[in-house]
Amino acid sequence: MLSLLTWTYTAVAVLMALYGVQSMIMIVLYLIRRRDSMDLSPLGDARPYITIQLPIYNERYVVPRLVKAVASMRYPRDRLEIQILDDSDDETRSVVDRYVEIYASRGIDIRAIRRPERVGFKAGALEYGLRQAKGELVAVFDADFAPPPDWLERAVQPFVADEKVGFVQTRWGHLNPDYSLLTRAQRLALDGHFVVEQVARSRSGLFMNFNGSAGIWRKTCIEDSGGWSAETLSEDMDLSFRAQMRGWKGVYLRDVVAPAELPPQLSAFKRQQFRWARGSVQALRLLAGRILRSPALWFVKLEALLHMGGYFVSPLMMMLLLLTLPMLALREQAPWPLAYASIASLGPVALYALSQREISKDGWVRRALAFPILALLGVGISWNNTLAIIGGFRKGSTQFLRTPKFRVESGDGAWHRRSYALKLDRNFWGELGLFLYSVATLWVATAHRQFYAVPFVSLYPMGFGYTIGLGLYQQYQVMAARRESSRRAKKPLVRRSLG
């Protein structure tokens, strides 16, 4: 008879496999639906009035790039308004004012909107700007984006074609994908979502999520769905799911691309993942009941819940590690059919490979080689994401920790010399403890000659070792840059002799 320990381990492994199966289902739906497309025609004289909202908080390095890109969009100036929703409390304010003055003098309707208090963070800023927006459509771009000139003309077409379209999401491209192994791994993860998953969901009648940037909303859809809410850090997922439950359509345009900067610092990436993980669980807590009571098909409901709970993979990985050591020490083994569940782990690998094959027919193999780094990164940040998920189940306000942007677009970008560079985060100590625990688990597996467990267990010390090592190295880079800056500030000016 199986012990409670073995039953628990088996249950966790089956839940992990469920997410692998979900990836396989996304692949099948994508392959079935990838040829489908909307009947879109040129806009002609149908030019809806559009407000572009740029929520900003302390982004002085990237504001010029963003404003220049948005102000250069090909769209009639008498049908376009640009709102810079500036909550900054540093030098970004003066940068924003300077660029507003520049482009306003060129006849562009652009202005900075500043709130008395930063209430509700990004969601609060979007809602505050919406009350003053002139447009019937509202586009949103985060500070790290640089959309091309034709983006607006192409992204607005579904609204003209169908009045039930509530929001349109376009694909995120990348400004610095080859900057480092870290950014290559991020490209792989994001492309899997934007190239395969979003297409599969949007074209198969499943709930798709707005991704918070590089998309457009119909203003009446926002209002009809209850507006932007700060109850969750994933205000984008929250509103898009509420809108679809109200009967509005979400449209995804894979071939319309807006490139953005990938975080080059591990601490910045972890902060981003922490916010996304906590926000998605908050959205799940708030909307799960409404989704289950909605008239949607059972498969649509199930997939929506799995979608919002995607970050549960992290605590499940943690539980497998914590359970493996006592399993090995007590020489207990999971039921043999569980071995077949490991096949599901091929789902994410195939999904990421397919996304690169669809983007680059020639270079997809080279790009897909970043998967081992992505796998190690996924293990290494599992503690970070688990803490976020635990916090996501607690009610109450949550601080919005921004992901710093450095305007790094090439291999020689010195992000660590920028003032927004983060210190080593506190989760380092948890990762160090888990690294030591995983090393002990690996030693027990080897000592007990249970070699079948070695490949699986080895992922944990390698994953935590990667994040620990990279975090320490980047911390050294930041501290060295700050010491050098301090020395330069203290160095007295040497005047040349006039004699």
Image (cartoon, rainbow, N blue to C red):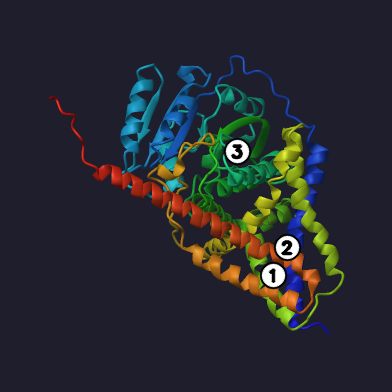
Q: In which quarter of the image is residue 125?
A: top left
Instruction: Report whether 94 appears left or right of 193.
Output: left
Circle 3 is placed at which residue position? Answer: 177
Residue furthest to the left in view is: 499
Q: Earlier in the sequence, mark 1 or mark 2?
A: 2
Q: Which of marks 2 and 3 is nearer the N terminus?
A: 2
Of 206 and 296, which appears nearest the observer? 206
Mark 1 → mark 2, Cα distance in angstroms: 9 Å
Picture layout, residue 384 above or below residue 151: below
Report x, y in % for residue 206: 72, 46
Q: Which amino acid does label 1 sit on?
A: Leu
Picture layout, residue 372 above or below residue 248: below
Instruction: Report whether 89 appears left or right of 308.
Output: left
Circle 1 is placed at which residue position? Answer: 320
Disc ID at residue 16: 2
Of 231 and 455, which appears nearest the observer? 455
- Please name the residue shown 26% across and 43% down the image: 489
Q: Which of marks 3 and 1 is nearer the N terminus?
A: 3
Image marks 1 and 2: residues in contact by CB distance under 8 Å: yes
Count neighbours of disc 2 (C-alpha within 10 A) and say few if under 14, some if 14 to 19, many if 20 or more.
many
Report x, y in % for residue 94: 31, 33
